[in-house]
Image (tube, rainbow, N blue to C red):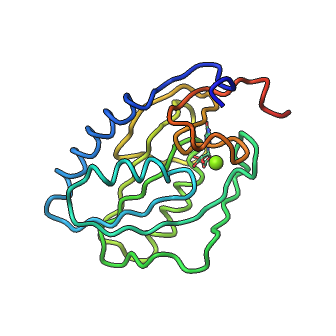
Amino acid sequence: MLQDLERVLFDEATILRRLDEIAAQISADYRERELTVIAILNGSLIFMADLLRRIPLPLKLDCLSVASYHGGVKTTGEIVFKQIALPDVAGRHILILDDILDSGVTLAAIGEKLRATQPLSVKICVLLRKEKERLREVEADYVGFKIADEFVVGYGLDYRERYRNLPCIGVLRPELILA
Ligand code: IMP
Ligand code: MG
């Protein structure tokens, strides 16, 4: 799998060092409020597991399964919620975890859905934030790394469901991306 990368952006040690910092920040911010994490699957699975184990606070965890890409490298703009029942967030302090803020379509749709059910607060944490113009205006409160507008895989991020188990994050060789 590593040979499919044009270059590595962040190795595992670098990612974990950054997670230490974000976890400390989140732990300080939610010291006095009970935190409910909503992890967006499948992309945030590995990030979630490593991040949450660094937060020494009582917290609740729910997952939301969403599809937005349908296998390509560009958003279709259409979000499919793969489950009928949304987590019950009324009266809770919500932290949404996702792998990457790209066009903003996914996080905007999820934010809207969750906000409609009366949470006390909603914040967003992403591992990666692409520096680009977004289709929907969304800001993340916690960001692991800012990256250029390139297609990346690994550490939970996929191309056609592959590469999620790569321990690092890297740019996929462009010739491997199907036209
Ligand atoms: P959105 O365009 O902000 O709605 O991002 C939707 C989803 O697209 C993200 O949660 C990722 O799963 C996926 N995605 C966006 N950019 C990349 C990338 O560079 N590599 C892999 N997946 C990506
Ligand atoms: Mg994906």
Residue at (36%, 78%) from the top-left corner? Answer: 90
Residue 59 lies left or right of residue 39; in this view the side is: left
Q: Residue at x 33, y 40 (%)?
A: 19
Q: Position of residue 40 (x, y in %)?
A: 51, 58
Observer-nearest residue: 36 or 113?
A: 36
Within the image, what quadrant is residue 164 found in? top right
Give the residue at x 76% y 43%: 72
Determine whether 94 is above or below 75 in the image.
below
Q: Taking 62 as reference, is 16 above or below it?
A: above
- Asked if residue 26 lies left or right of residue 172, the reply is left
Q: Quadrant of residue 95?
A: bottom left
- Residue furthest to the top in view is 7
x, y percentage for residue 77? 69, 52
Q: Is residue 148 above or below residue 39?
A: above
| Image x and y of residue 80, in percent | 67, 64
**Observer-nearest residue: 1 or 129?**
1
